[in-house]
Structures are given as C-alpha cells and as structure tokens.
Image (cartoon, rainbow, N blue to C red):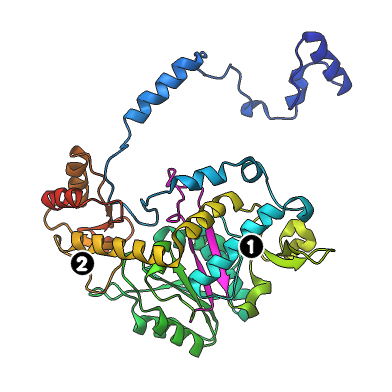
Amino acid sequence: MRYLPKSDSERQAMLAACGLASPEELFSHLPPETRLKRPLDLAAGISEYSIVDYFRARAAECANGYPSFLGAGVYSHYRPVVVDTVVSRGEFLTSYTPYQAEIAQGTLTAIFEFQTMICQLTGMEAANASMYDGSTATPEAAMMAVRITGRNRILAARTVHPEYREVLRTYAKHQGLPVEEFGYDPATGQIDLEDLERRISDQTAAVLVQSPNFFGVIDNWRAAADLAHRKGALLVFLFTEAVSLGILEPPAGADIVAGELQSFAISPSYGGPFAGIIAAKEKYLRQMPGRLVGQTTDSRGHRAFCLTLATREQHIRREKATSNICTNQALIALMATVFMSLYGKQGLRELAEQNAAKAHYLAGRLKRRFSAPFFNEFVAETGSRRPADINQALLERKIVGGLPLERYYPELAGCMLLCATEMSKRSDMDRLAEVF
C-alpha cells in the first residue's frame, strides 16, 4: 500500500469503502491453518547509529583487503574511479528504460556504443543491449540456436561453467529441450572432440563451448565449430573472463557468442548484478533475445538513436517473443562501456598480457593438473592435503584461496582452481605457494 492511514477513523473509512467491518475480514478467505495466531517474532527497533555500528562490525569480519586467488567466473580486477563517477550521474542512474527516444538520446547513445564495442570485441556483426549475466545469456543463446535451426537438442561441454550449465538445464526443462554433455581430455583439460563427434546428431541445434573454459584452459573451439557445422548445428562460444578477449583471437568463426562482462569494471558485489552479452552473425539478428538500439536520423537529418528491435513479450509480441527478459541492464552495461573506452584496444591487450604473466608465474611455483595453454586461471593439484585445509591455512594468513573442484567434478577431488589477475602481487603469490 502506498498510503498508510494515520488514525482509527481513517482506517474505518477505508474498511467501509471496501464493504468490510474489520481488517480480519481481509483475510477471511485464507484457511485457518495458514494464518499466524501470534505477532511476528521480530526484535525491537534500534537507533540508526546502533545499526551503523552493527554493520561496521560485520564489515570488519569480512576479508576486506585480503589478496584473493578466487576466480571461477567472478574476477578481482581494478575498477577505474571514473567508472563510478559516470554511472552515478542522475541521467544514467535514475533512468529506467529508454522507451521514449525523444527524451532518452543519451541512454540510447551509450547502449549503441556498448553494442558497437561488443561487436569489435567478439568479431560478431550484431550485439544486443546486454543481458542479465553470463549464466542467463547461455540458455538464451541455446534457445536462439533452437529457433534458427528448428532442432531441439543441445550439446554442452563439461568444461562450460557448472553453474551456467545448471541455469541452462533449468531453462531447457520446461521447454522440452534435451541437454546433453560431452567430456574433456583428462590430460589437457580441453574438450574431448571424439566424444563430441559421437554425441552430435542431425537433431543437434547447438554445441556450447567455453574458452578459456572453467579450468582456465584455452579450448579448441574451432574444431568443435567444424564438427557442429558439418552436422548443420550452430557453435555457441561462451566466455566468463572478458579480459581474455584482449589477447585471444576474437571468436569470429562461431555463430553466436554469449558471455559475462563482470571483469570490465563491474564489482563482484557478492555475485551480482552483472552484465551478460549475446552477439551473433547479422543473419541471425531477428532471433536475438532482448532488444537492440540502432542509428537513424531525426526529422532534421541529424544523427539519432532508437530502439530498432524489441521482440519482448510486453512489446506486443506476446508468445512470439524471443525472450521474456524485461529489464535492460543499461546501467551495469554502461560500466563496461566506460571501461572499454578508457582502456582501448592496446590497453586491453596490455591488461590481458599482465593477467597471463602473473598467472603463469604462480603456476610455475605449483603443480598444474592440465597441460594445455591457459589464460589467468589454472587447476592446481594439492597432493596429500585437502583443498579445504589449504584454503583454511591461507585464510589464517589473510589470503583468500581458490575453488575446490570436487563439488562440480568428483574426479578432481584433490584439485583447486586458482586465479591471478593484475591485482595479484608477487609477494602474495609467493606466500600462497609456500602454503602449498
């Protein structure tokens, strides 16, 4: 309720207007066993300064300032201060969505620039105006491939982020889309192409491959694309670490690219909100989910921007909509746009090189599980010690360790996923290696 009555007389007047004698009648339709017969068990209110003290004490218990070697889809990168300066401006911060182009040219311009940069980054011909995050962009890309091909089977590599695969299965379950997984080479950590070839069929709509994959390994997605195209399927290229695109060749040979831009000046923030992307070849543009901003001219012939494509369910399309996503992540995507503008092509390349160099320094002091090339993450073997014990020992030294892999990959019980970025200091990497 937006209006709360301030007196008994006001309450009675509101009840009378509704034809009720008491507030109890509002809930008379509910079964008695579902109604609470006592007041809510809530603590008494406290003062504002007591609340501030409480949260400061809880914050002091967190690992603020601890060096972190935890990656697995959320990465610790430097956030230029100008990013928050730009996105905190009222015209960006308070604008919800650019429905009226006449009064939203600034927002539309920023989104158009975002789309342009994503195309340059991925080597694709069209990009949408951002997704919620990489995990939801993954099934959206898969369903896009289903619509394009008219097929209904999806093949995903086990080296795709496990949580992305979980979201994919959730999306696909009630769409009636079978999701099958193919394995990886236990020596290299790359996809098992023979297993892929055995499983792919004439009913496969999409093959999903991530590179760098969940193990940090640079995967052989081009060979997977050849196998997919031979069977008439589409290759969906996925990424979780956007900085890698500063040094790796853009996935122009893929059909659809989906990924996560958290690395581009978006704070980890306990896991979100982030900004996902989908980019594709131009011929698939009308099957892209969400919406696209395009360039046009106004009545005076000046350059202007508008929503060119918005095939969402509330935009008349209803059941023909390509996606039920109904909120644009424009503010979060703007952070990535400012980041890409600041770094530029050469800056992003140098940043990627620094990430790779630091990760390789750390890996050189540990025992790696897989032999294939990697970017800024790798799987380390922990020997006779449990990964959880090593992480506890690191935490006692005020270091956040890596991700134990047994939860997602039982066959990797004695392994941990570690990440080093430009934020990792040599002294901290040496301390971590000593604990190992």
**For the residue labelled by badge 2, is the local secondary structure a helix, a strand or a loop?**
loop
Q: Indicate the position of residue 113 as horizontal and vertical percent values.
A: 60, 62
Asked whether residue 70 is in view, the answer is: yes
Is disc 1 in contact with disc 2, using a CB cutoff of under 8 Å?
A: no
Q: In this view, does 309 lie above or below 219?
A: above
Q: Where is residue 70 in the image (x, y as percent from the top left)?
A: 31, 51
Which region is colored magenta?
Answer: 253-280
| Residue holding disc 2 | 369
Q: Earlier in the sequence, mark 1 or mark 2?
A: 1
Hey, what amino acid is under mark 2? Arg
The reply to whether the magenta stretch includes residue 259 is yes
**Left or right: 410 in relation to 122:** left
Q: Main secondary structure of the magenta part?
A: loop
The kind of residue tagged 1 is Phe
Residue at x 85% of width, y 15% of height = 13
Picture mark count: 2
Residue on which disc 1 sits: 112
Q: What residue is rendered at 30% in x and 51% in y?
A: 423
